[in-house]
Image (tube, grey):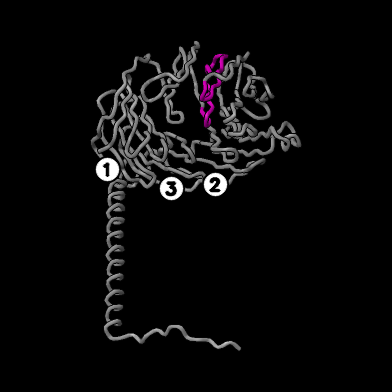
């Protein structure tokens, strides 16, 4: 066996060396503690500033930019993927913050009605016969009907559902993104009742229809769901589900996505969910008179009159996509419109406004110089776009 020769032997630690190591350890530990404390202080300051900004109520603002406009008196506005839609009896245009037209289309309508689903936009002449379908690039197709239009609903792909009627009957027609008719059905009043509202899913595969019925001298609503995919082919008239609601009227239907549908009745919101066959999953019953119903990205809400616990005139209820109440906010603002823009709840009239976040924090309350046509969340912290009758302003709360 080879002999192992020890080349080096660690000397025993002296008292001076032990003292040096102790001081070195304490020095490094002190630096680490100081660094940790500094980082903690910085994070606490950032969190404090963020919390202060998040929960602060603003009453003033800074004007960042202003662009003049010359719109007609009957022009209406709608928020569209960070841009603005302007539509009237004479035409529709999509403009950016600087009021520069990205696309436009002229027409002649007596009563234009609008629906938006993601990138698709449809405008139709209520009681008329003209329909225009757009995407972010501009006009996609034009549809002309033989019967007067009552309601319209569009999917994200541009599939368009039309509710038509004359003196004798009502019809539901479905068109693809190129304007080709996919299907049409006559609504027999003796069997289903009078159709009041329609809503198509974002994938264009399902259609919900609300029918007004009279049963024993009392009104009722029947929700009917059609499936135009392979599953619907196994059912008579492609009707995969239906339910009658006695004593209720359902004048509005909105699909939140491919699978979640909300029916707004005069008593509350009814939620349905199902990839192929929708089923009722939740009911948000309201106790007072519903004054307004609004929808946002993943949200639905109501404004109930006389429901305030502290003698407030209105109470705003905000629900998530599952029908759970996430906000109940009282207000006395004599509002004209209520909407969701991003995650903000906005109520406004001609010159006053209240803006809340989802936690119910009042972000802004105050008035503006001019007649407000629309308000929506801007790009950036505390930034908003104000649409007036003669200009568009970008502001920042301060």
Query: Badge 2: how crowded within 10 Å, few (<14), some, or many (20+)?
Result: some
On screen, residue 52 versus residue 154, left or right, reads: left
Residue sitting nearer the eye, 270 or 255: 255
Element on which disc 1 rests: loop
Element on which disc 3 rests: strand
| Mark before the other along the chain sequence, 1 or 3 | 1
C-alpha separation, residue under disc 1 versus residue under disc 2: 34 Å
Q: Is residue 251 visible in the rendered structure shown here?
A: no
Residue sitting nearer the eye, 263 or 179: 179
| Mark before the other along the chain sequence, 3 or 2 | 2
Q: Which quadrant is the N terminus positioned in?
A: bottom right
C-alpha separation, residue under disc 3 versus residue under disc 2: 14 Å
Q: Quadrant of residue 308?
A: top left
Residue sitting nearer the eye, 295 or 8: 8
**Mark 3 — residue?**
326
On screen, residue 163 versus residue 82, left or right, reads: right
Give the number of marks. 3
C-alpha separation, residue under disc 1 versus residue under disc 3: 20 Å
Residues shaded magenta: 116-137
Residue at image location 60% in from the left, 25% down from the top: 160
> For residue 120: magenta?
yes
**Mark 1 — residue?**
57
Q: Are marks 1 and 2 in contact (CB under 8 Å)?
A: no
**Mark 2 — residue?**
282
Q: On screen, 320 above or below 103? A: below
Q: On screen, 89 above or below 157? A: above
Residue sitting nearer the eye, 385 or 163: 385
Residue at image location 55% in from the left, 42% down from the top: 271
Name the mark on residue 1: none
| Mark before the other along the chain sequence, 1 or 2 | 1
Q: Are marks 1 and 3 in contact (CB under 8 Å)?
A: no
> For residue 85: magenta?
no
């Amino acid at each position: 066996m080879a002999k192992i020769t020890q080349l080096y032997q660690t000397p025993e630690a002296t008292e001076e060396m032990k003292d040096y190591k102790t001081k070195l350890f304490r020095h490094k530990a002190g630096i680490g503690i100081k660094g940790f404390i500094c980082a903690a202080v910085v994070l606490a300051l950032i969190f404090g500033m963020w919390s202060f900004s998040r929960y602060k109520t603003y009453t003033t603002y800074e004007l960042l930019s202003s662009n003049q406009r010359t719109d007609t008196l009957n022009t209406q506005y709608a928020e569209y993927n960070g841009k603005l839609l302007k539509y009237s009896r004479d035409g529709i245009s999509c403009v950016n913050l600087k009021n520069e037209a990205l696309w436009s289309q002229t027409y002649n309508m007596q009563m234009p009605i609008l629906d938006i689903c993601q990138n698709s936009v449809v405008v139709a002449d209520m009681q008329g016969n003209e329909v225009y379908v757009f995407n972010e690039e501009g006009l996609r197709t034009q549809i002309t009907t033989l019967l007067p239009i009552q309601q319209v609903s569009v999917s994200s792909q541009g599939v368009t559902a039309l509710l038509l009627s004359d003196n004798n009957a009502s019809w539901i027609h479905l068109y693809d993104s190129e304007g080709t008719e996919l299907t049409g059905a006559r609504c027999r009043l003796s069997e289903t009742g009078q159709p009041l509202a329609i809503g198509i899913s974002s994938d264009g595969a399902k259609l919900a229809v609300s029918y007004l019925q009279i049963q024993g001298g009392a009104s009722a609503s029947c929700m009917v769901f059609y499936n135009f995919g392979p599953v619907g082919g196994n059912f008579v008239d492609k009707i995969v589900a239906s339910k009658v609601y006695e004593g209720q009227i359902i004048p509005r239907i909105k699909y939140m996505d491919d699978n979640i549908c909300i029916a707004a009745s005069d008593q509350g919101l009814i939620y349905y969910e199902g990839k192929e066959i929708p089923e009722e999953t939740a009911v948000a019953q309201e106790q007072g008179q519903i004054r307004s119903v609004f929808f946002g990205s993943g949200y639905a809400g109501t404004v109930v009159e006389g429901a305030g616990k502290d003698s407030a005139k209105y109470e705003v209820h905000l629900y998530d996509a599952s029908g759970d109440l996430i906000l109940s906010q009282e207000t006395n603002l004599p509002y004209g419109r209520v909407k969701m823009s991003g995650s903000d709840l906005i109520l406004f009239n001609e010159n006053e406004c209240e803006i809340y976040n989802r936690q119910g924090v009042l972000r802004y309350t105050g008035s503006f110089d001019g007649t407000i046509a629309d308000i929506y969340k801007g790009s950036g912290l505390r930034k908003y776009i104000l649409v007036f009758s003669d200009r568009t302003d970008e502001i920042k709360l301060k």
